[in-house]
Amino acid sequence: MGRPLKIAMIGHKRFGSREGGVEVVVTELARRMAALGHDVTCYDRSGVDVMTGDQTAARESIVDGVRVVHVRTIDKKGLAALSSSFFATFAAIRQHPDVIHYHAEGPCVPLRLAHLMGIRTVATIHGLDWQRAKWGKLASTYIKLGEKAAAKKADGLIVLSRSAERYFKDVYGRDSIVIPNGMDRKIPRPADFIASTWGLSEGDYLLFLGRLVPEKRPELLIEAFKGLDTDKKLVIAGGGSDTSDFELHLHELAADDPCIVFTGFVSGKPLEELYSNCFAYVLPSDVEGMPMSLLEAMAYGRCCVTSDIPECADVLAGNGVTFEKGSAESLRDVLRDLLARGEHVSQLGIAAKAHVEKAYTWDSVVSRTLAVYEGEAR
């Protein structure tokens, strides 16, 4: 290991949260870097966690060796990320770290301020967020400003996929380094809590797990599922994110089918059991960065079905099944085929687990990210 670094991380909502992939990545990087002897500060938003309902106030604490600072946040739709990233940048600049690591496009807007102050900046683009359906024209324009700041001013630019690498090269002429997310080895859990709570048993349900937002297309999965002749259930696990009307719409779509189960946000033991016991995991997204839920499902040895967007297909690397993006008919055909081929489903799950354990390790992610901090990208 090189010299100990003073590192600030900005752009996530809450350290230790599983609300989204950004939160998982920041938490894993921060904990592991702190364990290596680096001085790591995560700047969290203040306010209410939309997934858990937990209330946070402006305060500072040490968690798993990481300094966690809650910064002021205007807790209104469209303003939370904007306000917290600026307040976090001001706070970080005062501490003058060796590097400020920004996560996601929108929070990169104030990156220019850190750059002007002579602080090394690194940006990780978790996805082209301006494409997400929940954002209106004004919000998308603002997010694009963050993307441009990252492309033009960041000292190091990290992307999660080859398609994102090509995008930044084609649009901005900017070279980036691909560092995919990591994943720990997973131990399958028997159906205990999920059996008593939702009546689920091993292999008797299909699983969608993620934020209930339009770009993830859970309504497409509901449509495809309702056209299947099967005794299996469909489990929709996850909570909303600034799109409560969309979540209500999903419940309306599923109201006439008792085989569709909504669990809400899950974590801990229920989450582990849901992954471990599903017949197949389905991610029908139109837009992704690098979905942590997909990596997790593969790590549990599950057969995975995704849309054919590069961000998902590249992760599967042939160890799963894809369908035509946006097509409920194509998704239904794929699911119908898998439901008739149980042995094939098992083989795909075994192959997925082996692939993830070989190709996606957190040790690699941490060492390569630290090299970007030091200007030694590899």
Image (spheres, helix red, strand yellow):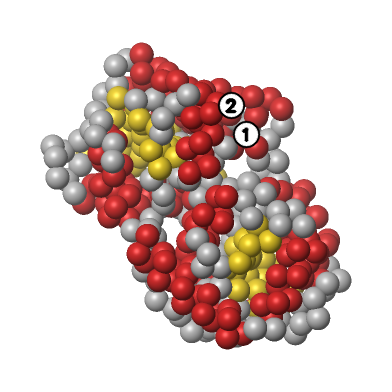
**Amino acid under label 1?**
Trp
In the rendered image, the vertical position of residue 14 relative to residue 200, given as above or below: above
**Amino acid under label 2?**
Lys
Q: Position of residue 42 (x, y in %)?
A: 35, 40
SS at mark 2 in the image: helix
Mark 1–mark 2 distance (CA, rounded to whole Å): 6 Å
Label 2 CA crowd tier, 10 Å (few <14, some 14–19, many 20+): many
Query: Disc number at residue 144?
Result: 2
For the C terminus, the quadrant is top left
Write down the quadrant of residue 371 in the picture. Answer: top left
Q: Which residue is mark 1?
A: 130
Task: State the residue lying farthest toward the top.
Answer: 116
Q: Is residue 44 visible?
A: no
SS at mark 1 in the image: helix
Nearer-the-camera pick, 358 or 56: 358
Q: Is residue 172 visible?
A: yes
Write down the quadrant of residue 142 in the picture. Answer: top right
In the rendered image, the vertical position of residue 239 relative to residue 146, given as above or below: below
| Disc 1 + disc 2, Cβ < 8 Å | yes
Label 1 CA crowd tier, 10 Å (few <14, some 14–19, many 20+): many
In the rendered image, the vertical position of residue 12 relative to residue 348, given as above or below: above
Task: State the residue lying farthest toward the right.
Answer: 256
Question: Which badge, 1 or 2, comes first in the chain's sequence?
Answer: 1
Q: Which residue occupies 63% across, 46% down?
A: 287
